[in-house]
Image: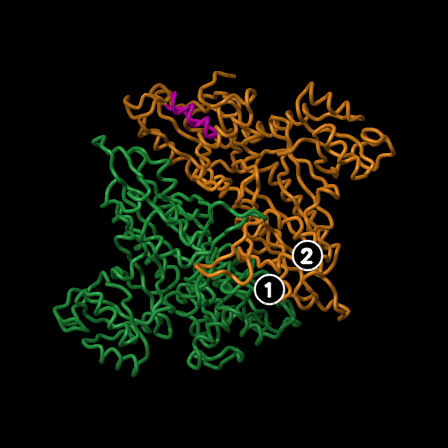
Chain colours: A orange, B green
Amino acid sequence: MDNRKMVDDITSMDEDFAKWYTDIVKKAELVGYTSVKGCMVIRPYGYAIWENMQRILDGMFKETGHENVCMPMFIPESLLNKEKDHVEGFAPEVAWVTHGGSEKLEERLCVRPTSETLFCEHYSQIVHSYRDLPKLYNQWVSVVRWEKTTRPFLRSREFLWQEGHTIHETAQQAIEETEKMLGIYARFCEEVLAMPVIKGKKTESDKFAGAVSTYAIEALMHDGKALQAGTSHYFGDGFARAFDITFSDRQNKKSYPHQTSWGVSTRLIGGIIMTHGDDNGLALPPAVAPIQAVIIPIAVHKGNVIEKARQLEQQLKNIVRVKVDDSDNSPGWKFAQYEMKGVPVRIELGPRDIENNQCVIVTRHNREKTVVSLDDVATVVQQKLKEVHDGLYSKALENRNRRTYDCTTTDQMIDEMTKKGDGFIRAMWCGSEECEAAVKEKTGAGSRCIPFDQVQISDKCVCCGKPAKTMVIWGKAY
Amino acid sequence: MDNRKMVDDITSMDEDFAKWYTDIVKKAELVGYTSVKGCMVIRPYGYAIWENMQRILDGMFKETGHENVCMPMFIPESLLNKEKDHVEGFAPEVAWVTHGGSEKLEERLCVRPTSETLFCEHYSQIVHSYRDLPKLYNQWVSVVRWEKTTRPFLRSREFLWQEGHTIHETAQQAIEETEKMLGIYARFCEEVLAMPVIKGKKTESDKFAGAVSTYAIEALMHDGKALQAGTSHYFGDGFARAFDITFSDRQNKKSYPHQTSWGVSTRLIGGIIMTHGDDNGLALPPAVAPIQAVIIPIAVHKGNVIEKARQLEQQLKNIVRVKVDDSDNSPGWKFAQYEMKGVPVRIELGPRDIENNQCVIVTRHNREKTVVSLDDVATVVQQKLKEVHDGLYSKALENRNRRTYDCTTTDQMIDEMTKKGDGFIRAMWCGSEECEAAVKEKTGAGSRCIPFDQVQISDKCVCCGKPAKTMVIWGKAY
């Protein structure tokens, strides 16, 4: 493995992880900055990653019976105010529209921070009988939250996301939906983004505003900080009661339906960067990479190299997303460029290769070189893409395993993080909000989730020493 | 042809076209109303039409080298103000954000009514050399214009659209792009939406705010009113000068690049409704119909009808978007329901059909019935979809031809519209803004465009009688 650092102007991740991150999003041309703080331009290369994610997720949603809709972006203040917990959670961070043209609006409108209230208004118009249920909706839109501290993808004032909203006859059906969608997110992260995640339930203090329970998938980034990668909420009939959504049930009685919502966002692009990237730049999971294989002709002035490269492109283009770079830049510059852009597979093709009816395939994540007969390229490229996916996943899982610490005291938590760096801490909890807050206060690590896969670390709360109820994953988070 | 009116609760189009339109959008479940005037919910059936349009158009854009990006939704007031004509055109109809959470913003932000200013800010950061040009960008977003009078799809305060934005080395390249995209829109309307359009140039008074020239495609609706179905603008270097976007040209001199923008929106769904719909409801062009063929089992309690219907669905599902309706409703109710929803092809399958190894195929636009062997269904359904497309197109073209009047005086314009109803009027124009305004004032018909395909109706201006410069299409517009 060749570890020479080809891209000299990216800050090393071990030196300054935050600056490394900013370097990557700029130099890989994922985003541009604008004059509105926290609002970014998603550039073609960044947007193409999102389009691939959208296409795959949208297919998974439709396969499970969901339909896309589109709600307006504005929520009247009175509508936002209808559900008490919800408005308390979101009102402090919404953008308010007060004027249309030169006229002051009679009621101010917020730009949706999330769309539960809009879906509820719509449900109240269209749900009358159990025959109208369930409604399994999703929308792909952008939302706005007026955050104080912002970072591209991770925490921006406007971000792109999908928000699923469903409404059901019974609590059980809604709970099943909540869990099903969490499962889909986990599968998407692991099988598409090569990002291992832990599925679990959020504690009471960390629930979505208005939810009965919130489930989340949590991923561990390269630097040992946690990223909440997706959430799925069960609302019970709280929203239905607040918005007076009722239906005639099978006994012909008036009944309140049960709701869910669930979402993932462009934040996942931040997750990809911080899970797989290295000092040479991005490393993209093949399933969402805009370019899966780049062909670099070597010594283009000699013989028929460019022609052969184009032939190879033709041969591959129905199988993978492929591009030839026949620009004037040097092969070395191109190698560094496409490594920085995280292209999973590089194919080098020079005059001597052509003479020998071969090419050289290099995989981004480990720089392993394979000499391949031109007759086998199509098959080998597909194998290599699979290898890259698996390699990225293993590396991420290994990082998470190395950075997962089982602790029985808060002192031990601090000690582990000091010695080995931030990570996921598995420790028992009595269930009290006081202990949860105290752990965060003492260690800096908050509760990430109560994982579905419980392991008994001890029988006492890591904080108060009283009998423990559950194991919690703790960590510092983005 | 069976003309019985199956859907009794749709207002007849000849009685009240506006009410007919509203009935359709509600009863075909395209939109839902919200508590914010002019902001609609696009329901699954309406959104699925938009998704099909998006997928096809997006393919056409990418084939011609365009890349998708995503700009923020907010424009600071100072940025909107940079190009004089542009701000004058849009400032009166934008929604203003003045507060983030509880804090008043230092500078108010408008919700984008269109994104030229945002693209310009971005170009000024990324365009330095002729090597950086052209940039061929597009984005799929929603925009907001605070209209006084609103109607679903046709004129809503928030609407979904795509906006293409490109920047070029030379004026000629930008003009070619403007024309190329107009051509793509025309092809899309005719070949995908079965909607005949006229390509032309807007008059000076009707140009986009900030454009050197605006091109448009104009369609004629069933009621004889015109719909501007898409526009393409050439900006020259006006925006570049206002936003100080410069590049080193091939002579290494500082130069201003030339820009374009172009867009179509969910307005096209309104166009589809008013071009193809009838008193039985929607009639959807097959290429964008969410359901292209619906299978209706007859006498479901007898024999294996449902099983056979499901088999037929399996047989067709990789070829067309097909659905079986095996609900409890009567066949008659289902016929009316899917006619209202504009499903192009209905397949009826009953016990006697199965005995005879056949089914009955009915096309939506003309209710023609064809008995088809079950062995040939796949082929015939595809033929029928083609027939529906062609039939819808011919009917729309025939309507436009019947309603196109060549006039040499404004009195004749009034006379034709009084006798035969609204339509496109072809009449000559001297080129003065006074005459253009006077024609509108007298006849109610404004200039729609100066068509590329010019026909010499006379040699005098329809208004002042002085020598004419061009033929103009006039009409009342949505």
Structural distance between the alpha carbons of marks 2 and 1: 49 Å
- Tell me the number on the disc at residue B66: none
Q: Is residue B406 left or right of residue B91?
A: left
The residue where tag 2 is placed is A83
Tell me the quadrant of the picture where the C terminus of chain A can be found. Answer: top right
Q: Residue at x 61, y 36 (%)?
A: A190
At which x and y percent is residue A428?
80, 32
- Which three-letter amino acid code belongs to the residue tagged 1? Lys
Q: Is residue B412 magenta?
A: no
Q: Is residue B37 left or right of residue A404?
A: left
User: What is the crowding at mark 1: few (fewer than 14 residues within 10 Å), some, or many (at least 20)?
Assistant: some
Q: Residue at x 39, y 56 (%)?
A: B91
Subunit of label 1: B
Q: State the residue in front, A418 or B352.
A: A418
Q: Is residue A338 magenta?
A: yes
- Where A240 sits versus A380, above or below? below
User: What is the crowding at mark 2: few (fewer than 14 residues within 10 Å), some, or many (at least 20)?
Assistant: many
Q: Is residue B213 left or right of residue B15?
A: left
Subunit of label 2: A
The residue where tag 1 is placed is B308
Please indicate, yes or no, whether residue B200 appears anywhere in the rendered image: no
Please indicate, yes or no, whether residue B261 appears anywhere in the rendered image: yes
- Which three-letter amino acid code belongs to the residue tagged 2? Glu
Label 1 sits on a secondary structure element that is helix
Q: Is residue B240 left or right of residue A92?
A: left
Magenta part of the protein: which range?
A332-349
Q: State the residue in front, A129 or A31.
A: A31
**Tag 2 and tag 1 share a subunit:** no
